[in-house]
Amino acid sequence: MNIQTYTQEVVNLHTHSHYCGHGSGEIAEYAEKGLEQGLHLLGMSEHCPVPDNRWAVSRMPYSMLESYNKDCIDTKERYAGKLEILRGFECDYLPQYHSYYKELQQQVDYLFFAVHELSLANDEEYSLFWYPISKEDLFAYTKLYLEGIESGLFLFGAHPDLFCHSYHSWDEETIACSKDIIECAIANDVALEINGNGMRKGLVKTSGGTRYAYPHHEFWKLASETSVKVICNSDAHKPSHVNDSMGRCLSFAEDCGITYSTFEVGKSREIEGNASLSIIGGEHASSLKRDAVSR
């Protein structure tokens, strides 16, 4: 198996097309725009459908799974030698889908996860994007996120600071929850993602000043003091966004003292064969400065 290394500025692993139900564009259009915007490695990662079609109102229905897989493989073959294309899914992790995700993990190049909705014990579920969240909701979000990290299924966790979209205070609770997520990611060797789509959503006004809805500087400053692996993705929902936010993400990381990880892809000879994808790194400017001072 041939191993190829890629640096962050030429990689995006978080990409949605028309298949996801709230995105647009064909997979081949993302590949073409990816080439134009300087990508060398593109991962397609629709919101993962589940057999009971939960979330199907805003996610890919289960019936489209075969079509999506074929489309990814066909596009990978079409762009072979010009752009490395991987096939994956963004999963909303809940324990009842663990076995299904485990089986799917063997069929694709990679899986990652996120928490978009709070799924509560009484079967209520609501989006983190549409409603303010309380301290109790913040703790529920953190619990769900930790379960995703600890599941052993996922290469990275997407937008771990998404709670900042609807929880505008940076307080003892957000600090504690952020540290729990970061420490759990380190313990389980799971990378965390700085999300470009949060930047596209614009700025929000809070009591602490004007900032992105997410990513949140304070979260990533905490991360920069640790050895957690950090990556950046566009979270594109239309072809023109496939790598458009990389400049802002690189500046954001520098401001926070974050050094992005690199990526290794083990490529088989067969176009449809699964790739071996790994994330390498975890030393950040802030942690190196801290270690130097401590010595």
Image (cartoon, rainbow, N blue to C red):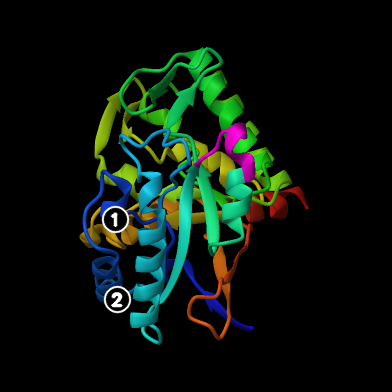
In depth, the one of 88 and 71 nearer the eye is 71
Quadrant position of residue 72: bottom left
Main secondary-structure element of the magenta-colored stretch: helix
Residue 217 in the image: x percent, y percent? 44, 40
Closer mark to the observer between disc 2 and disc 1: 1
Q: Which mark is residue 35?
A: 2
Q: Which mark is residue 17?
A: 1
User: Does residue 130 sit above or below 276 in this rendering?
Assistant: above
In depth, the one of 84 and 203 nearer the eye is 84
Q: Is residue 42 left or right of residue 292?
A: left
Quadrant position of residue 208: top left
Residue shown at 40% from the left, 51% from the top:
252
Instruction: Count the labels in the image.
Output: 2
Q: Which residues are magenta?
A: 92-99
Q: Is residue 259 visible?
A: no
- Mark 2 and mark 1 in contact? Answer it, CB < 8 Å: no
Q: Amino acid at mark 1?
A: Ser
